């Protein structure tokens, strides 16, 4: 997905979430902001936390809110994080 986006929008600067390319699901075409699946990000956080101390869903959500959403300060290029409403993950 990342390579496809970079080819199609070669003249644009994107703000990627390092280590979460597999969570990238698209681009908002008018603003050229990347779109990430929050569910995939949270699943990855939980999976990666198993190496140390497994995080609960709530811990992963809090980690995501602090380290992903709040830390994005480049408002023109901030990624969009979507929630799958039909998902039973929550």
Image (spheres, rainbow, N blue to C red):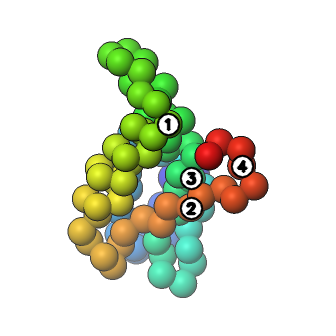
Residue 87: which numbered mark, if any? 4
- Residue 5 appears in the rendering: no
Is 19 placed above or below 70 here? above
Ranked by sequence position, the earlier of labels 2 and 3 is: 3
Spatial separation of the CA atoms under disc 2 and disc 3: 5 Å
Q: Quadrant of residue 26?
A: bottom right
Q: Name the residue tied to disc 2.
A: 82
Spatial separation of the CA atoms under disc 3 and disc 4: 12 Å
Residue 37: which numbered mark, if any? 3
The image position of residue 23, as x and y in percent, is 54, 46
**Element marked by disc 3:** strand
Spatial separation of the CA atoms under disc 4 and disc 2: 12 Å
Which residue sits furthest top? 51
Q: Name the residue tied to disc 1.
A: 57
Ranked by sequence position, the earlier of labels 4 and 2 is: 2
The residue at 44%/45% (across/down) is 61
**Element marked by disc 2:** strand
Ranked by sequence position, the earlier of labels 2 and 1 is: 1
- Disc number lying in front (3 or 1): 1
The image position of residue 79, as x and y in percent, is 42, 65
The residue at 69%/59% (across/down) is 85
Task: Say if mark 2 contacts mark 3, CB within 8 Å.
Answer: yes
Residue nearest the observer in this picture, 3 or 18: 18
Ranked by sequence position, the earlier of labels 1 and 4 is: 1
Task: Say if mark 4 contacts mark 2, CB within 8 Å.
Answer: no
Spatial separation of the CA atoms under disc 3 and disc 1: 15 Å
Spatial separation of the CA atoms under disc 2 and disc 1: 17 Å
């Amino acid at each position: 997905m990342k390579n496809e986006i970079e080819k199609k929008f070669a003249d644009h600067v994107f703000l990627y979430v390092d280590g979460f390319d597999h969570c990238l699901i698209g681009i908002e075409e008018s603003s050229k902001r990347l779109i990430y699946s929050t569910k995939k990000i949270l699943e990855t956080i939980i999976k990666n936390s198993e190496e140390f101390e497994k995080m609960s869903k709530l811990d992963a959500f809090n980690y995501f809110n602090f380290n992903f959403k709040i830390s994005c300060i480049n408002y023109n290029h901030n990624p969009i994080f979507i929630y799958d409403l039909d998902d039973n993950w929550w």
